[in-house]
Image: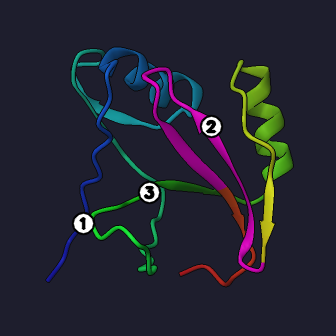
Amino acid sequence: MISGAYVMIFTRDEPADRAFLRDVLELPSIGDGEHWLTFKLPPTELGVHGHDRNDFHQIYFICDDLDATMAKLAKKGVACSEPQTADWGRSTAMKLPGGGQLGLYEAYHARA
């Protein structure tokens, strides 16, 4: 029934955030190469978590080694927040040029 998902990032600086996803995170894309890009995402999982807000969603990219990924991002000028550890894994946040942020985490659970 469902053949895919479309995730949207709303931003105040579309060109800068698109360039970040293309050049820094190296996500492949289709589109005109600059002004409109649709990015291919790696295998994706969807979790449903309780929260005080009902219309609240977050995007986290998953990596196999959080420290190595943070080091690679740092070489590209990306600052990440201090890693947090929980029973499900370790996580950090990286700031997008447009002012938003994306999560990044190393999962401890079995991956779908």
Query: What percent of the width, then of the height, locates residue 33?
Result: 30, 18
In the image, what residue occupies the spot 79% across and 52% down? 66
Number of the label disc, if any, that sits on residue 4: 1
The mark lying in front, picked from 3 and 1, is: 3
User: In this view of the protein, which residue sits in the foreground, 3 or 98?
Assistant: 98
Q: In the displayed structure, would residue 81 be above or below residue 97?
A: below
Q: Is residue 81 left or right of residue 29?
A: right
Element type at mark 2: strand
Q: Residues within 10 Å of mark 3 (few under 14, many from 20)?
A: few
Q: Which residue is mark 2?
A: 94
In the image, what residue occupies the spot 44% across and 81% down? 50
Q: Is residue 39 left or right of residue 21?
A: left
Q: In the displayed structure, would residue 91 be above or below residue 79?
A: below
**CA distance for labels 3 and 1:** 18 Å
Q: Which residue is mark 3?
A: 58
Residue segment shown in magenta? 87-104
User: In this view of the protein, which residue sits in the foreground, 16 or 39?
Assistant: 16
Q: Residues within 10 Å of mark 1 (few under 14, many from 20)?
A: few
Query: What percent of the width, then of the height, locates residue 89?
Result: 75, 70
In the image as oriented, which residue stretches furthest toward the left?
1
**CA distance for labels 3 and 2:** 13 Å
Residue type (three-letter) at the residue carrying disc 2: Met
Q: Quadrant of residue 51?
A: bottom left
Q: Is residue 13 left or right of residue 44?
A: left
Q: Quadrant of the N terminus?
A: bottom left
Residue type (three-letter) at the residue carrying disc 3: Gln
Is residue 83 magenta-colored?
A: no
Element type at mark 3: loop
In the image, what residue occupies the spot 71% across and 18% down? 77
